[in-house]
Amino acid sequence: MTSWKDLAFDTDAIIDGLKPWIECESPTWDAAAVNRMMDIVAVDCANLGAYIERIPGSMGFGGSVRARFPHPDMDKPGIMVSGHFDTVHPIGTLAQNPFRREDGKVYGPGIQDMKGGNFITLTAMKALLDAGIQTKLPVTFLFTPDEEVGTPSTRTLIETEGKRAKYVLCPEPALPDNGVCTGRYAIARFRITATGKPSHAGARLKDGVSAVRELAKRIIEIEEMTSDSCTFSCNNISSGQWVNCVPSFAAADCLSMSKTQADLDAGVEKMLALSGERNGVTLKVERTFTRPIWEDGQPETMALYEKAKAISAEVGLDMPHASQGGGADTNFTGALRIASLCDLGLWGNGLHTLTEHIEADMIVPRTRIMAGLLATLD
């Protein structure tokens, strides 16, 4: 009888199959681009015999794809594979970081975070189906469009699907040395707006109060609140376009990462306390989206981790684990105490940059580990 251990995977074939996914650029804020990517994914899943649901987007984001694979026990809790297809890279990044294989690395926007991990998971599922290996549990893939901005439109969808599952597998980028993630820090996002007083910057400079100047000072102060347990980072800064006007409006987004619930609560309190007037400028701080703490060491997650570690050992690799910063959709499922394992995707470097890549020699081992998980979890 064929076992998952007998499956053959080919690095070159996987890289060739990944190419159209990488060359379909899909930045979060471009709903049409994300939907084009979801079209490709839906067809690939349908070609494997999955039942496809296209879930319309909301809040200006693209839609989602849910693919349920036929199984005798489809009505029972099974395996949920959770992944996102949006990236941080704007349309045109492909020209700067084209899909290519060089010196043992495979490059392209979104290849590590997380199209590569999604692709090897689907490749593992295909290999099981082609070999006639029935998974012990029903398998559902849920692909979403807005993870890179905090999952504002699909959090409820992920949580709802997660509650139907016994296990959640998330192929976000691997940790070093074949590592996986068994917990994640919380992430809180904030919108900061500053309101000053306008004037002509040439003829009446002293009549105005610059919102930009005050916001710049506040950003420095915010980022200097960073500690080992709670970090603060600001970006997406905007204001008026006329340099001959003293700016009466400025805005920025802030992201805070916390290791514990107490750290999260304290960081939120510090940020919200910044609201008020100073130097003639009114500052307003609003909390937008939060990824909850997924506490490390939960028994249900560690039991799942031990299963993955044993499969990895059969592949010939150790599998360390860690709690990790950087948000993922397992923040939601882990916080609900659903057995979740993250960072099951591909190892590489340069994620969110113009050098984003994966290591080619880890493609097959990680695909084999995923096949083992899908085949043996019960």
Image: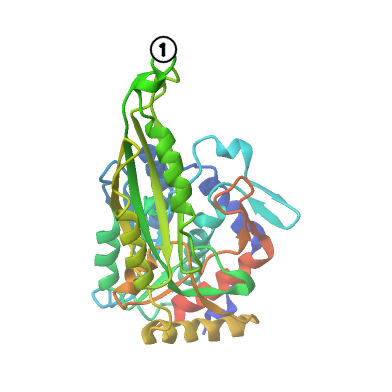
Q: Quadrant of residue 53?
A: bottom left
Question: Which class describes the residues within 10 Å of circle 1: few (<14), some (14-19), or many (20+)?
Answer: few
Q: Quick one: 133 or 360, which is closer to the camera?
A: 360
Q: Quadrant of residue 96?
A: top right
Q: Quadrant of residue 94?
A: top right
- Height in image: 330 above or below 107? below
Tell me where residue 22 appears, x and y as whole percent.
Answer: 54, 47
Residue sitting at x 51%, y 72%: 370
Please indicate, yes or no, whether residue 79 appears anywhere in the rendered image: no
Tell me where residue 290 appears, x and y as whole percent.
Answer: 32, 59
Please say which color scheme the image uses: rainbow
Tell me where residue 319 appears, x and y as whole percent.
Answer: 58, 80
The amino acid type of the residue labelled 1 equals: Ala
Q: Quick one: 357 or 248, which is closer to the camera?
A: 248
Quick one: which residue is furthest to the right in this view?
103
Mark 1, residue position: 203
Element at label 1: loop
- Height in image: 176 above or below 286? below
Please indicate, yes or no, whether residue 55 appears anywhere in the rendered image: yes
Tell me where residue 303 appears, x and y as whole percent.
Answer: 42, 87
Residue sitting at x 35%, y 38%: 279
Q: Quick one: 107 or 206, which is closer to the camera?
A: 206
Residue sitting at x 45%, y 42%: 217
Residue 81 horizontal side relative to residue 21, left or right: left
